[in-house]
Image (cartoon, rainbow, N blue to C red):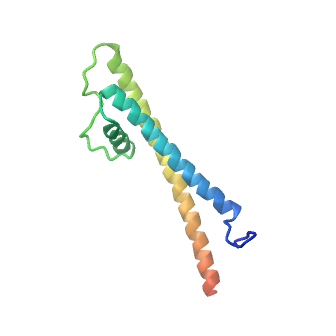
Amino acid sequence: MFQGVEGNHMPRQEHQRCRTIRLQIEITGRYIWGGAILFAHWEDWNLLDGSYFCFISLSTIGFGDIVPGDKIYHGHGLELSFIFCSMYLMLGMAMIAMCFNLMQEEVIAKMRTLMRIIRYIFRCER
């Protein structure tokens, strides 16, 4: 089942799964960090508040304790920031849902592999 020169290397498929999960976490983290920088700049928040808002909003928890738009804009800036904020949140929710779904599939595949290994070790027939 596990092949390698020394017998302790991960197979290529398993290595690919680990890279996929790592990439999904990195993409999600960068998306949240990018939004945190943008909202911190627009709303005069610090980066912690910006990242907190992005994480809470994108994970659909939405406590409402920090909301964009508290800083009063006059003129054209309010509409533009509202449109961008809405687009950021909609695209981000779709992206995070996709990443969670892909991670869920990877975890299920790992659990199935683990069950096959356990059955092989104990020689259980199903």
Image: 2 above or below 67: below
Q: Looking at the image, which residue sits at the far front? A: 6
Q: Looking at the image, which residue sits at the far bottom? A: 123
**Residue 18, position as x, y percentages in the image:** 59, 58
Which image quarter: residue 42?
Answer: top left
Q: Looking at the image, which residue sits at the far right? A: 5
Image: 95 above or below 21: above
Q: Is residue 11 visible?
A: yes
Tell me which residue sits at (26%, 44%) in the image: 63
Q: Looking at the image, which residue sits at the far top? A: 75
Q: Quadrant of the C terminus?
A: bottom right
Tell me which residue sits at (36%, 27%) in the image: 41
Q: Is residue 90 left or right of residue 21?
A: left
Image: 43 above or below 61: above
Image: 43 above or below 57: above
Q: Quadrant of the N terminus?
A: bottom right
Tell me which residue sits at (57%, 66%) in the image: 110
Q: How many marks?
A: 0
Please state which of residues 59 and 27 is positioned toward the viewer in this rendering.
27
**Residue 35, position as x, y percentages in the image:** 41, 35
Which image quarter: residue 49?
Answer: top left
Q: Is residue 124 visible?
A: no
**Residue 33, position as x, y percentages in the image:** 43, 39
Q: Is residue 66 left or right of residue 96?
A: left
Q: Is residue 80 left or right of residue 94?
A: left
